[in-house]
Structures are given as C-alpha cells and as structure tokens.
Amino acid sequence: MIERKRIPIWAAVPVLCALLLAGCSGDKGQEKKEMRSISVATVSEAAYTDTLNLSGNVTPVETANLSFKLDGKLKEVYVREGDSVEMGQKVAELSMEDYSLQVRAAQAQFRAAEAQYATAKMQADTDAPSKIAQAKAQLVLTQKTYNRVKALYEAQAVSQSDLDEISAKLAADSETYHQALEGKNMAVAQLEAAGAQKDQAAAAADKAVRDLADTALNSPMKGVILKKLMNGGETAAAGYPVVVIGRTDEVTIEVGIPDEQINEIKLGQKAEVSVYGIETGFEGSVSGIGALADSNTRTFTVKIRVKNPAGVLKPGMIANVILHTGSQKSVLIPLDSVLQRANGSVVFVYDAASGTVTRKVVTTGEIRGNSIEILSGLEFGEQIVTEGQFLLYDGDAVQLAEEVEP
C-alpha cells in the first residue's frame, strides 16, 4: 500500500499566493508592453477675444405712471394689461357731469364780468370826460360873469348882494368841476377793478375748460400697458396712478458687471443680445454704467439699449448679453486634455524622441468654449496628448495616431 500524507491547508496558502502573484506580475508586464494610440497638439500662443456672457431682464426704456389731475369717479378704463397704445390714445376717462356744470358757471361769470367792464369803460372813457367838459365850461362862464360884476361893484354900479351872489355861484361851479375831475379818477379805478374781475373770470373759465379736458387720460407715448391699477366705477384721486405704461420701441437690458471688469466697459460699446425663443439676434449698445456697486452682489449695473421697433422684445423677458472686452493672447489647449489629479491639474506631454509621455502639473486659467487657458507649466513647442490621455501613466510608451496642428 502507498501511504498518502495529508498536507495542512495553512501550508498551501503561501504556494497559492505565490502562484497568484506570479500570474498578476506576468499580466502587468504584458500590459506594460501594450502601446496605446494617442493624438497630440503642439502648444502655441493663441489669440482670442475676451467676452462677458451675462443675463438680464428686458425693461422699457421709459415708463410712466398715468394719473388724473383731478378727483372724480372713473367712467371707464379703456385698456388692459399688455395692450399696445399709440401716443395720444385715450386710456381712461372720468365722469364729466360736474366739470361740465363748472364750465357753464365759469363762463356765465365771465360774461357778467365782461359786461361790468364794458360799463366801467364807458364811464371812464365817455361819461366822466363829458361831465368834466360841462363843469369846466360852466366854470369858465361863471368866472367871466364874476369878473364883470366885480368891476361894476368897484365902480359902485352894482350892490354888494350882486357880488356875493356871483361869488357863491363861482365857488359852486368850481366845486362841481373838481368833483368831475375826481369822478374821472374814480371811473378809471372802477375800470381797473372791472378789468381785474374780468381777467379773473376769464382765468376761471379757462381752468374749467381745462379741467373738463383733463377728465380724459391720454397716453403720452407709444408703448405697452404694463399694469392696470383701477377699473371703471372706482373713485380716482388726483395724482394716483390708474395705469402704468412703458415705451417699448426701445428697451433696456440691465446686467451686473463684476468690479474687476467694470473698467473695461465703455459707453456706446456694442453688445450682442439674444432671447430664448426668438431666432433673430439683436444689436445693442451700452447706454449707462452704474457708479456704485451693489452691496450684496458686488456688481455694477450696466444698461444695454436695444432698438425694438417691431415690439418683439417684451418687458420681463430674460435676455443673454455678450460684451466683447478686447482681443488678447494666451496659451489655450483643449479642455479635455487637462486631467484633474490629487496634486492638481495635469497634462501628458509627448516626447517624440523616446516615444513616451510625461505627466506635467499645470496652472489653469479661464475656460473659453472648448479650450482652457494655461498660465504656467507648459512651454511653446511641446506636444500635449489630446486623445487617449485618460489611461496613460507617467513614462508610458505610446504610438502616435496623428499629429494635430492647432
């Protein structure tokens, strides 16, 4: 008989591990011998246009709160929110009955004042001068008579009573003449007072007519009704808005610019504007630059004005604005060629002499489209791996599939 010896399982473990390690070592060695295919691009300086891509709300270039100058009951509001209106179009109206009565009363007062003025003018221009002329003529006649009687009295041809009688009449006629002169002055004063009353009545009549016209509320611009605040039948107070209107033949887009870039923005600078759902783009220009940064966002408000004659851009839309801040030069490489590792951003550089790749740590800048800016870590003329880089290790041997010129 053949005696079989049992081998404890703990004694077989090292052998199995050795076999497994040998197998893994052989596979890894075989894997290292495989050469991966890559594509490369040569590092060089590239020119690009620096742009700001921003979003903002479309707002009317001008808005107005339309209100009545008068108190009154609203007869009707003729517009709804979103309606387009023309300049001068009636948008609301007050009840006119009370203001029509005021016009009639004011016009009647004006006619009465006008008649009183005409009477005063006749007295000042006709009656008073006539009385003065009569009184003066009588005074001149009496003066002559007095002179004759006095001469006769001195010649002792007439008595003292005759002289006294004519003297009294001369005094009376002189007083009548002076009263006629004062009457002229009073007539002129009455004429001036009547003229002032006439002017006051005319102004009151004009105001009543204006008030009647102000019962109609007309649009001061061509635009869109943004908000309707009151309806027919309600009582409107003078100065309280009834509707809010916005001028939309031009619109403004407000965007926020970071403080580190605000000095690159200039008045009149062109901007590209687009709105989701509208196929055509628009051209705008910078019409305003804020002088004070927002305390929360630390951005400056910049206004972009866009012509909108067809009214395609509606208030409240979200617009995308692109501002070109100038051309610059930098090292740009494909975004996918940069890999993120524990020690930072890395790229693989291809060495044509040895046919291997070397991993390099780089400092990245801004992402521009499908490219990324490299601030340091690469030199001009180096060839970076743009395809096949995800399975590479530092020092791997590779085969070049194609060489891509930037």
Image (spheres, helix red, strand yellow):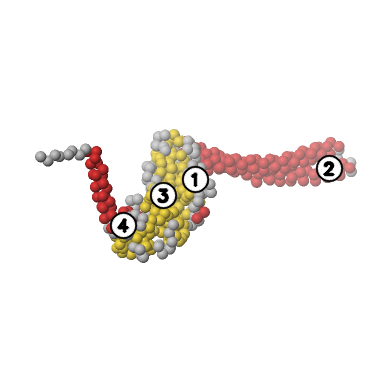
Question: Which residue is at the far front?
Answer: 1
Few, some or many residues within 10 Å of mark 4 (<14, 14–19, 20+): some
Mark 3 sits on what residue? 343
Of residues 157 and 402, the one drawn nearer to the viewer in this rendering: 402
Q: Is residue 104 visible?
A: no
Circle 1 SS class: loop
Few, some or many residues within 10 Å of mark 3 (<14, 14–19, 20+): few
Mark 4 sits on what residue? 388
Mark 2 sits on what residue? 149
Mark 1 sits on what residue? 298
Q: Amino acid at mark 2?
A: Val
Question: Quarter of the image containing the C terminus?
Answer: bottom left
Nearer-N-terminus badge (3/1): 1
Residue at image position (67%, 43%) is: 188
Of residues 380 and 335, the one drawn nearer to the viewer in this rendering: 380
Q: Position of residue 80 (x, y in %)?
A: 37, 42
Q: Amino acid at mark 1?
A: Arg
Q: Position of residue 126 (x, y in %)?
A: 65, 46
